[in-house]
Image (tube, helix red, strand yellow):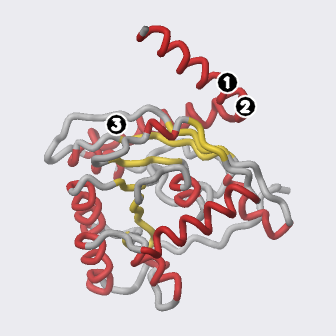
Amino acid sequence: MSDLAPMREQVYADPRPKEHFDRFHERSRTREPDWAYELTRMLTSLYAYTFLRARAISSEKVPGAGAVILAPNHFSFMDHFLMGCYIRRKVRFMAKSQLFKPGPMQFVYTHGGVFPVRRGARDEETFITAETILGRGGAITMYCEGGRSRTGKVAEQAKRGIGRLALETGAPVVPIAIHGSSRIRNWKRLQFPEITVQYGDAIRWECIEHPTPEQQQAVADEVLLQIRALYAGLQEHGRKGVLRRAREQRRTRRVAVQ
């Protein structure tokens, strides 16, 4: 029997037409996240720091300004909050369109800078919104695995959307490993995992106006390869071991500069 709490069945098709989501895209393209973003970050960060004992490694690798695509693995609904806890920038991310329904969470999403993606459809509006935000020097989160992993393991195959976004914008991509979040849904069993978020070195590709599917896939595969390497390091050495290695690398670089 799996030690992971069960997840709800995935629902990919959203019967609502594209036009239903135009107002959410328009807001994301023309307005920055407001107080709802900071309030949500404060509350989720408190939860992460206390119950999940979340800690970050090498968050300084995320550029402090300018366009950037943040690419974590995806196990939990908390992943975007965990990744943003240690970044002073306001990070925008896309969420499945089914989450945009009347209620308090829709208010949080729209005022917090979230925009919808219609899964299973060729949703060009999502790319237009993402590229508009990056064009203003913003930060976007995109999961190269697509949806959440249901096995507790990093996916073997990347979705090529992140490759398209990286190539069409020329924005650097920061691979991120979030270790432990697959067990966050075990809170119902009063089990709270230790979470570690490790940020990798930014990767940048030359801008291509119309990249081929093969080019998009090659970039997406490279991003996922870097995520898998970071995640494997956390699994093998643990948080303390990876932190120790990171400190040694920083000392080595300082000595080399001197």
Tell me whether the residue at label 2 lies in contact with that at label 1, contact meaning CB atoms closer than 8 angstroms. Answer: yes
Tell me whether the residue at label 3 lies in contact with that at label 1, contact meaning CB atoms closer than 8 angstroms. Answer: no
User: Disc 3 vs disc 2: which is toward the camera?
Assistant: 2
For the residue marked with disc 1, what is the amino acid? Arg
Q: x, y percentage for residue 257?
A: 41, 11
**Residue occupying image coordinates x 51% and y 90%:** 103
Q: CA distance from mark 3 to mark 1?
A: 32 Å
**Residue occupying image coordinates x 27% and y 73%:** 31
Q: Identify the disc placed on residue 218.
A: 3
Count residues near mark 3 (Cα–Cα under 10 Å), then give few for <14, some for 14-19, many for 20+: some
Q: Which residue is mark 1?
A: 244
Q: Is residue 89 left or right of residue 29?
A: right
Residue most toward the front? 258
In the image, residue 153 sits, relative to residue 108, either above or below, namely above
Circle 1 SS class: helix
Q: Is residue 165 left or right of residue 118?
A: left
Count residues near mark 2 (Cα–Cα under 10 Å), then give few for <14, some for 14-19, many for 20+: few
Count residues near mark 1 (Cα–Cα under 10 Å), then give few for <14, some for 14-19, many for 20+: few
Circle 3 SS class: helix
Q: Is residue 208 left or right of residue 218?
A: left
Q: Is residue 47 left or right of residue 135?
A: right
Q: Which residue is mark 2?
A: 240
- Mark 3 and mark 2 lie on one chain; the one further toward the N terminus is 3
For the residue marked with disc 2, what is the amino acid? Lys
For the residue marked with disc 3, what is the amino acid? Ala
Q: x, y percentage for residue 78?
A: 60, 62
